[in-house]
Amino acid sequence: MAKWSGKSKGTVLGYKIFIFFIKNVSVRAAYLVLFFVASYYTLFSWKSGKAIYYYFRRRLHYPLLKSFISIYKSYYVFGQTLIDKSAISAGLRDQFTYEFDGVEKLKELLHNKNGGILISAHVGNFEIAEFFFKEIDENSEINLVTTDQEHTAIKDYLESVTSKSRIKLILIKDDLSHIYEINNALSNKELVCFTGDRYFEGTKYLEMELLGKTAKFPAGPFLLASKLNTPVAFVYVMKETNKHYHLYTKMATVKKRDAIFLLQEYTKSVEWILSRYPYQWFNYFDFWDTNTSAK
């Protein structure tokens, strides 16, 4: 069964090296170091490598050699997004340019006090979505539903060298108390943002085809969004060049109490964004619940 542990790879030393280059040399210098890091993961991170190879070879139908080369490209772009997030949160936001596609829809939701649900995915650099939201959310009315399972030492270090976000976080907890926080935020006509492409073992899930093969998705965001009379939008933050990002916001069609229909709308939107940014699929685990035995 496909399973994501909830933790990302990395060490405190690795982050310290990148932060040193970002602050004392340049972001481009950190990208240069990343060449060696991405090469290491390409050669030695077999489990995640097999999973991402399957994505390129069997789901995107890339030729054999291109699929192997794409593993490195994927790791490299993913590393860039982590460096960019660190740089932006460390005060270097003005070194990047930003493009907003559909941001007026988010502004309208906030201005009209309608509240709403935003659903994203682990594609592009969702890690910096909070910095986009800060531009349009002066009253802190956007909430991010997230896990708190990163390595504590890494979190402590990053919080000591980067600025603290004003975006409100709703942490997923074992006692399910986060459900009350989500309901409170929606009752206050605020926006609540989920990622819809990772479920935890033992939680409810829905199944739907993505890129031609059935996969499991967390049921919560889609069940909740389809039950409530509230707007739903799909949101993605994609890296386009070394210093340029593009925020996409697309309003979803919702049928009352039809979570499957909403999930289908979501998977179509994910497929659309991946058709434009194929190297920015960052689910490095057995997403399609396969033995990843593609050749």
Image (spheres, rainbow, N blue to C red):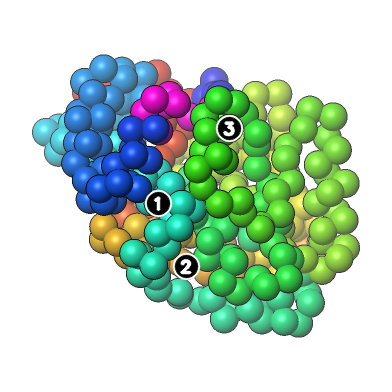
In front of the other: 174 or 242: 242
Label 1, label 3: how many angstroms apart (C-alpha)? 17 Å
Q: Secondary structure at mark 1?
A: helix
Question: Where is mark 2, residue-wise?
Answer: 248
Q: Which of labels 3 and 2 is toward the front?
A: 3
Say above or below: 275 vs 31: below
The magenta region covers 6-15
Q: Is residue 58 left or right of residue 193?
A: left
Viewer-proximal residue among 260 and 117: 117
Circle 3 sits in a helix, a strand or a loop, which is it? helix
Inspect the image, locate mark 3, and give the three-letter code of the amino acid beneath it: Asp
The residue positioned 70% from the left and 23% from the top of the image is 202
Please tell me whether residue 87 belongs to the stretch shown in magenta. Answer: no
Separation of disc 3 and disc 2 at Cα? 31 Å
Of the residues shown, which amino acid type is indicated by label 1? Ala
Identify the residue at horizontal 71%, vertical 76% (top origin): 110
Give SS at disc 2: strand
Mainly helix, strand or loop, the magenta region?
loop
Residue 237 left/right relative to 36: right
Residue 156 is marked as 3
Mark number, residue 87:
1
Question: Quick one: label 1 or label 3, which is nearer the N terminus?
Answer: 1
The spot of residue 148 in percent (x, y) is 65, 34
- In the rendered image, which quarter contains the N terminus? top right
- Whether residue 182 appears in this view of the structure is yes
Kind of residue at badge 2: Tyr
Q: Residues within 10 Å of mark 2 (few under 14, many from 20)?
A: some
| Image spot of residue 36 (x, y percent) | 19, 30
Label 1 Cα neighbours within 10 Å, binned few <14 / some 14-19 / many ≥20: many
